[in-house]
Amino acid sequence: MHAALPDRWEDALRAAALLAVDPDGLRGIVLRARVGPVRDAWWRLYEALLPDDPAPLRLPGGVTAGDLRDDTDLAATLAAGRQVVREGILTRAARRRLVVPMAERLERAIAAELGQRLDGEAAPAVIAWDEAAEAGEGCAPALADRLALSVDLDGLSRRDAAEDWAVTPKDIADARRHLPNVAVPEQVLADLTALTLSLGVSSLRAPLFALRAAQASAALVGAEEVEADDIALALRLVLLPRATRLPAPEAEAETEEAPIPPEEQTAKPSRDRTATEPAEALSPDAVLEAARAILPPDVLARLLSDPTTRRGGAGTGAGDERINLVRGRPAGTIRGRLDRSARIDIIGTLRAAVPWQGVRTPAGNQRVAILPQDIRLKRFREPRQSALIFIVDASGSAARGRLAETKGAIELMLGEAYARREDVALIAFRGADADLLLPPTRSLVQARRRLSALPGGGGTPLAAGLRSGAALAEQVRRGGTTPYLVLLTDGRGNVGLDGQPGRAAAAEDARRMARLIAGDGLASLLIDTANRPQKAAEDLAGHLGGQYVALPRANAAEMSALVRTARDAA
Amino acid sequence: MGHPFPFSAIVGQDEMKRALTIAAIDPSVGGVLAFGDRGTGKSTAVRALAGLLPRIDVVRGCPYNCAPEAPAAACPHCSDLANIETRQRPTPVVDLPLGATEDRVVGALDLERALTRGEKAFEPGLLAQAHRGFLYIDEVNLLEDHLVDLLLDVAATGDNVVEREGLSVRHPARFVLVGSGNPEEGELRPQLLDRFGLSVEIGSPTEVAERVEVIRRRDAFERDGGAFLSQWADAESIHRDRISEAQHRLDEVTTPDIVLEKIAELCIALGADGLRGELTLMRTARALAAFTGESSVTTAHIRAVAPSALRHRLRRDPLDEAGSTSRVNRAVDDVLG
């Protein structure tokens, strides 16, 4: 049985080699890792493979969509008095390597433009650093789907990141030359495609990327055709990170195929490879084993248990600016750098420039001498988006009904969500913990899918529900959206934060969480679902600093109307 | 190679290919909205169709792609020219990026000229570039509402009118609007949904054999584009010719009264709001009849295109579990028998 951690580092290094061999076919890599010595070590080893390539470009923080494209450099044009064109980042990055730091916070618009460029020719090879701390966030899908490889270095320590690696620039150059000669047996193509399907990966790019990765891997050892090890590597680096489900283990208890032996730490890629057939590398058992080795434990657990869960970041990362420069209601004028993503305030600019005309000389063809510091931009204010976070008590016998009504209320609200610019989310607590059943979404389709099977029954971990709600609210806030919590409970928890039963501790924990929520300034509404309104619930609402309403037999329509009214009044 | 993937070589996606073909035959049908996950070949199909269509003649240097034999009266560039030179170019396909601002889409004051030379000039935007071609919007359900409104307005009238910052410009902008979106990401407003002519549901093929063929062809195309294109050249020109003939024959296709009645019955049965459903269904069926070489529209044509024309116009009932496509098919069975 091979230890998990060294394999991940090995795989990361192999990924670097594959990317160096075929940047065109693979397009890039998403590297999930915090800033630190492990990531630096990987980067050093990767760069060492391509000493003759031009240095990689880096996407600057705060880059705007305008910076990506070629454009007239207005400030320089003003200074010179004739047109000066500035090359966009994407033009400069054509066919070169482009590092995208903080990929999880990349604005959607930027990710979309970058993604579009990746679809075309003269695309850059993108190395995306995914620095997300939370499990829910991740690199924007528009970008991640277009990058073949994906590696997770989270949790590795400096000690695991051995730097004695035997792949040299010459190996890379040889592999590049050999790549067009690598054949792919027909059966391998069919098997890869079938596997992609069984992993629940719908994107058609994925199997093609897997094919390219396998070919690059074979090219590295000078093999004539793709073999089992290459396919297994493609499985780990391309397909498993995209999986939304795992195949069931084979029922037969026949002797297992020899597990693919771990390559030694200092092994050069060699012709001395496993004798297994390519097909065996893709058997469900092999897949499951690979998944256990490389996927983070929480992702693995989710894939194994919940068939309806989707992987990957659903969040949009960094939010839009609150004070907007392009849309919303006008809100004055500010000085600013001029690029195409802002609306220039011509009158304001002229007003700023006119007083200085006596001492300025117009350059070139200018009639009015305008300098960059005169530029004024229009400012807009956009109505803030909001997110409704339902926290529902799913414990005990009344759970099913309560959950069903909440689901109905959510669907009713989502039916009109487009008009209200509102996301809706659902957290249910029962047993020992709380689950985020529906991440913030505006999509009725998604709500239906995720809420089709609702679990219920068990103890009442009220504090855990509040804690999850508070955490989600914070995440949502960071994205620039205003959260509003709706708590459905009778106020009587019996499971504490540590997962242990005990009314007193549970109540104390719940109070503490409630006061934290109030302290964070989060608006909330507590809907008392007990048959007779409870003091406990009312007290809790007091600690939350929010509103309280008793609704003993809540039905979907009443609930949604109530939430809407309370929300508008808040 | 700069040539897009051949349209006829696309595996499956029959509904999408037919919708695009119909939109090319009769642009008055309206745009095409494609629902589906990412990576399912939506933008490939649009580009492929544009690559299939014959090259167009344009006035050299005109940023609005004006046709030389009839430069638009409204075209600011061509109305000034005494001597018109022509050149050929492929049918334009313009991508609308997600963060596009109104300025970029519609066009704006040419700031460089304004600030350096004090001249008022119009800098054409993406709509000008898309004239006589296709405008493809990825993730249309994330685009701002007012931009979608604007695009649909222009698509309906064929003219882009800009009145801002001292400018008053009008230029032709006739294009086929193709939008793609993933319903999981968010809903499109019903008013906007209704203004798209056809809708298509795209899933990646679930049959392994079909998926393998997709990958195989894509792989062959990437490895040796020239050979792949020659292999498919015949199929491409057959399709191109059929589209041409259909365009010419379109006016001669008749729609019998009984068929019109059926169309109306169908829309009433489905509770589709407004009359756009009927108009679109009629135009679509007529274009299909022209494409298949028939001289009049029959109920078979209606049956074939009803889901595309109607599934996105149904009043949304959050409590109804059935998908829209099956609702349309049920109604079709009821009305047409």
Image: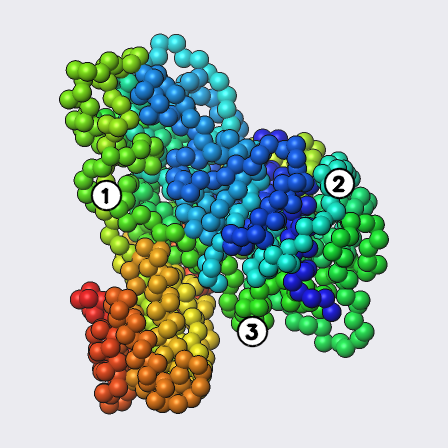
Residue A171's tag is 2
User: Which residue was labeled with disc 3?
Assistant: A305
Q: Secondary structure at mark 1?
A: strand
Mark 2 lies on a secondary structure that is helix
Which residue corresponds to the image point at 72% horizontal and 61% vertical from the top-left? Answer: A282
Q: Give the answer, above or below, for where B106 lies relative to B191.
A: above
Q: In the rendered picture of this protein, how many numbered marks are placed on residues?
A: 3
Q: Residue at x 52, y 36 (%)?
A: A57
Q: Which residue is mark 1?
A: A380
Q: Are marks 2 and 1 on the same chain?
A: yes
Q: Residues within 10 Å of mark 3 (few under 14, many from 20)?
A: few
Residue B133 placement: quadrant: top left
Query: Residue A163: x and y, percent?
Result: 68, 50
Chain of residue at mark 1: A
Task: State whether residue A393 is above or below residue A147.
Answer: below
- Vertical placement of residue A383 versus A509, above or below: above
Q: Nearer the viewer, mark 2 or mark 1?
A: 2
